[in-house]
Image: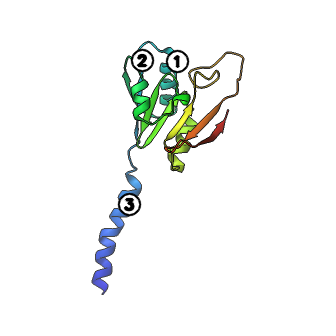
Amino acid sequence: MNIGRRALLAIGVPLAIFSFAAPAAAAVINVVKTASCGCCSKWVDHLRKAGHDMRVTNVEDVGPTARRLGVPDDLRSCHSASVGKYAFEGHVPAADIARLLKEKPAAAGLAVPGMAAGSPGMEVAGQHPRYQTILFMRDGKRKVFAQH
């Protein structure tokens, strides 16, 4: 019996140390945008500054990507992004993305519809417009995820 415990300790301790020493790799956020969109590039920079690893693909039309990701038409914006099972549409703040990835709700993703003034990449000097980040579900339901 004593040998069994020693064997478990010999295996278990190194595994426990490895699990603390080797954190899981961060997920890459995949962004689809048009090459000429300056506000989209600013949003990508905002996420990079927050520590996200980004993979950017330029396309002529982001619509097919938004549809594939399940973004409702009325929540569309100028770029679409995804990580894992979640979609991000428009100028969603990095803090909202981090919160969603931590909480892992049963949802399709987050959207800041349109070109919301004051959102990351759409800053307006001297102004602090209000906007909302919307959590949308695959069944069409939605709710306000954050107020800004």
Label 3 amino acid?
Ile
Q: Of discs 2 and 3, which sits in the foreground? A: 2
Location of mark 3 (residue): 17
Q: Secondary structure at mark 3?
A: helix
Which image quarter holds the C terminus? top right
**What amino acid does circle 1 point to?**
Cys
The residue type indicated by label 2 comes to Thr
Q: For mark 1, what is the residue?
A: 39
Asked whether, in this view, residue 11 is left or right of residue 68, the answer is: left
Identify the residue at horizontal 67%, vertical 15% (top origin).
125
Q: Within 10 angstroms of label 3, few (less than 14), some, or many (20 or more) residues? A: few
Measured along the vertical axis of the image, is residue 110 above or below residue 55? Answer: below
- Label 2 to label 3: alpha-carbon separation: 45 Å
Name the foreground residue: 127 vs 59. 59
The crowd level at tag 1 (other Cα within 10 Å; few <14, some 14-19, many 20+) is some
The label nearer to you, 1 versus 2, is: 2
> In the structure shown, which secondary structural element does the residue marked by tag 2 occupy?
loop
Residue corresponding to mark 2: 34
